[in-house]
Amino acid sequence: MAQCTDQASSQNQATALLSRAVESAAPSSAQKSAQPAHRFISSLTLQLLAMLAVLYIGLWNFYPWRPLAELDIPAWMLKYAANTAQIVAGSKAQVIILGSSLIDAPRGRLKRDQVYQEELSTAWHKPVSLDVSSVPGAMMSDQAFVVEKLVENGKKPELLIVTYAPREFMDNEVGDKLTSTPTRTVVTFLNRRQSLLPRSLSAEAFTACAASHSQFCDLVRRHVLRQANQWICRVSGHPLTLWEASHGNFGGKSEGPTNQADAQSTDLNSPDSQGPAYEKRLALDLQVYQKRYNPFNEKRMNTQLQALDELLATCASHNIAVQLVGMPISPANKNILGPGIYELMDKKVRQIASKYGTQVDDINQMESFEQTDFRDSVHLSKTGSLKFLPLFNSSVVPGLQHHLAPLMRSDK
């Protein structure tokens, strides 16, 4: 009898435990009402994140590039950098010339925009398709970047002519800010749709992609703040900058004295005439180059020489023929360089070129250029341009014959 009682008690306890377990497992009415709310909040969060992602992609793809570029680049320089970006994106030329404003000077002085294509076609007695990338202030690292992007976009030429002068290897004004030069900035802007996502799964690709997005967000932020400041200044009648305040140019667009000096030194439409204006222009240009060259920074020069090595290595691995052409500079400009600096640069350029079997023609060593051949200290005048072109042709035409003639015969 006692055993039956104990069994009944145990069964009751088990039943009670089972009931409590079922009750705890089954959601309460409060829990049932909370679940839809939680799902709604999660769904709303996902929708908000999706909307922000779509908005950001829209900004990335369609935000105007020019106002962002003008935050750090003078407006007069943008047209040159934009032309280079267009070449990187869509060039179909057999020959591409890379250089700075020095290679562009003869086009402006002679009023012939296609002067290189016309001259080389005439000298070779065959038509040559040619693009010229000439950005004022371009460094050798910029040219290596352009070549890298040409290869990435499948726009490689048959012959690449890389022009250079001492500044391309030792510009103190550019310093070590090599990723924010006009060439890199504008090319990156105009090709940014291709860099929304990493190009590969490597750590370097993810780092580069993150840096690109970070720079874009910072530029948009700065542009929005500048627009807001300009609006406030227009409404209040206060000058935006000290330059505007001192010149009474409220709300106007001024680039300041430094950029105006640089613009004047590369203004290819100003006259060549000798006289006070010429002397003033020359003195101003020599002051600019004094800062660019001195003090001499050998580490900085070696960085740019390494960029030249990388450029030639990229071309060698993708079967792009390269020719290096040293641009003429005036005696006054060369005298600013320290003793032996020009010879050191020339020696190292030739050592790197010899590794890849690349031809080097320094026009400074082919012909003597006088100060009257220049409109300042580096940009050729009309008479200097007429002296330069035959030398340039004699240097480049053998390369055309060697690298393009076999291709033309195979096309027939």
Image (spheres, rainbow, N blue to C red):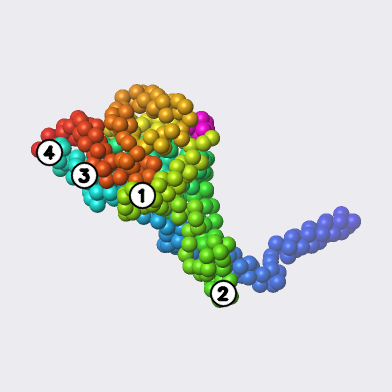
| Disc 1/disc 4 C-alpha distance (Å) | 41 Å
Task: Tell me which label, 3 or 2, sits earlier in the chain.
Answer: 3
Q: Residues within 10 Å of mark 3 (few under 14, many from 20)?
A: some
* Amino acid residing under circle 1: Gly
* Amino acid residing under circle 3: Gln
Depth check: 376 or 236 in front?
A: 376
- Residue designated by label 2: 237
Task: Tell me which label, 4 or 3, sits earlier in the chain.
Answer: 3
* Amino acid residing under circle 2: Gly
Q: Residues within 10 Å of mark 4 (few under 14, many from 20)?
A: few
Q: Is residue 125 left or right of residue 146?
A: left
Query: Which secondary structure lies at badge 2?
Result: loop
Q: Quadrant of residue 282?
A: top left
Depth check: 109 or 95 in front?
A: 109
Residue at 48%, 44% in the rendered image? 287
Q: Give the magenta range.
A: 296-301
Label of residue 57 in the image: none
Query: Which secondary structure lies at badge 1?
Result: loop
| Disc 3/disc 2 C-alpha distance (Å) | 51 Å
- Residue designated by label 4: 125
* Amino acid residing under circle 4: His
- Residue designated by label 3: 117
Label of residue 275 in the image: 1
